[in-house]
Amino acid sequence: MRNPVGKLLLFGATGDLAQRMLLPSLYGLHADGLLPEGLTITGTARSENSDAAYRSFAKKALDEFLPEDRKDESAIKTFLPRLQYQALDANDLAHYKDLAKKVGDVSGGLAIFLSTAPSLFEPVIRGLESAGLTGPTVRIGLEKPLGYDLASSREINDTVASAFPEDRTFRIDHYLGKETVQNILALRFGNSFFEPVWNAQGIDNVQITIAETVGLEERAGYYDTAGALRDMVANHMLQLLALVAMEPPARFDGTAIRDEKAKVFRSLRHIAPSEAPHVTVTGQYGSGASGGEIVKSYVDELGKPSTTETFVAIKAHVDNWRWQGVPFYLRTGKRMAVRRSEIAIQFKAVPHSMFASKGGLLQPNMLVIRLQPEEYIQLLVMAKEPGLDRDGIRLREVPLNLSLDSEFAGTRRRIAYERLLLDLIEGDQTLFVRRDEVEAQWEWVDAIRAGWTANDMKPKSYASGTWGPSAAIALTERDGVTWQDD
């Protein structure tokens, strides 16, 4: 049920996320007539800006980060007047009164987008509360990181819950805003032929890879305290795993879908300290070649010694009826061979090959869901090569492709934040993460970190521009499985 607000408040309104994603997304919604009539957008950050100066800042961001085909000067001209700005020292309670005055009457509804360091959650919530900006017409969107472990996550969630009940709290994982991620649900639950084999009887293993070619860039301060496990596995990768593994929800709504995801997280087998060295691999990139350029090691980029992992591979299990015995291999890292996010579902081999006596070799079917850089769904099936077969039957794996880019070529591909910001403005929680999901994810991740500490596991070095440490290959190969690297 849509319940749009009349005002939007953006914290971190001069930051990188605002420039690259939030302002272009809000402009895109405005240009397509999807924002509520009269919606005002108040930006706030530490730096001093007048309304006019912030509009100039926003215009510059749109000029730089909007695709050329989306730039429409008349639409930009009508979008910028929606923007206003109020400087804020998040730790100074007195400042929030000025902020509330700038935002104005919130009886018609206010959505707050909070992108800030975890240490500022408490003062921001207290400040909003003191200024009357937490009432029943106000909802809040929270950008990660929401803590560094279960304890700190609970602390943040408790702070937020003291002012905002769960039905007005929207925890953001931008992967859930991606079109292809939502297509996992359409693929699984909109087609009758997958469901009978989408279980331990039909599937041999599942691989989830999020590989980046970039290094630290501007995130050194945050990344060195987080590492790959907290930065990618504790949210994006586990959310993808849940969408693959969840039971069919009764309906497409926030409660039903999040109930089923939460069950998956509660079913994840906790990795005991004795198991950690055998089912997890950590790595840290060394120097090497990436994108045709020689690049520095992580430690050289950081400028100091560090044992933070930039790569992690995990063999996980979902201990329930549907998935008993099926390994889920998770892999993510920086400075890897290519940029790629994908899910590969390896089906089991046919129980008997009638072609073996004729020399025909079968490969098990595989379903590949590519999230980026291209977006497609590919099913690898066996077909017979044309010929008279005098020397035996030749079988070959051929792809059945659904390219979302070409199939829906006339439809504009939206930034994930467009959907998430619109859902926040309209009050739809389906694609946001619930507290019990977050805490179950952290419980699982904390157990892995405890195992690393207990075994004094240090990340193994791997050359930039490769697929990570060789131990990651061994993690799957000893099960007779090969990473999908094509």
Image: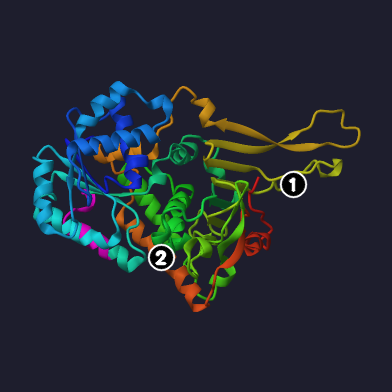
- The quadrant of the picture occupied by the N terminus is top left
Which residue type does callout 2 highlight? Thr
Where does residue 79 sit, x and y in percent of width and height?
25, 29
Please provide percent x and percent y for residue 397: 71, 38
Residue 352 marker: 1
- Do we see residue 106 in this rendering? no
Residue at image point 10% right, 48% down:
98
* Count of marks placed on residues: 2
Q: Which residues are magenta?
A: 155-168
Relative to 303, residue 48 above or below: above
Q: Please tell me whether mark 2 sits on a helix, a strand or a loop.
A: helix
SS of the residue at dot 1?
A: loop
Mark earlier in primary sequence (2, 1): 2
Q: Which mark is residue 225?
A: 2
Magenta run includes residue 280: no
- Judged by depth in the image, the label closer to the viewer, 2 or 1, is 2
Q: Nearer the viewer, residue 320 or 44?
A: 44
Label 2–label 1 contact, CB within 8 A: no
Answer whether residue 166 is magenta in the image.
yes
Q: Whole-Å distance between the Cαs marked 2 and 1?
A: 51 Å
- The structure residue drawn at horizontal position 31% and vertical position 37%, both measured from the top left corner, is 23
Looking at the image, residue 136 sits to the left or right of residue 342; the answer is: left
Taking 50 as reference, is 238 left or right?
right
Callout 2 crowding tier (Cα within 10 Å): few <14, some 14–19, many ≥20: few
Q: Is residue 256 above or below residue 303?
A: above
Residue 96 location (% of width, % of height): 12, 52
Q: Nearer the viewer, residue 71 or 136?
A: 71
Instruction: Name the side, left or right, on which 52 lies relative to 351.
Output: left
449 is higher (above) or lower (below) than 236: below
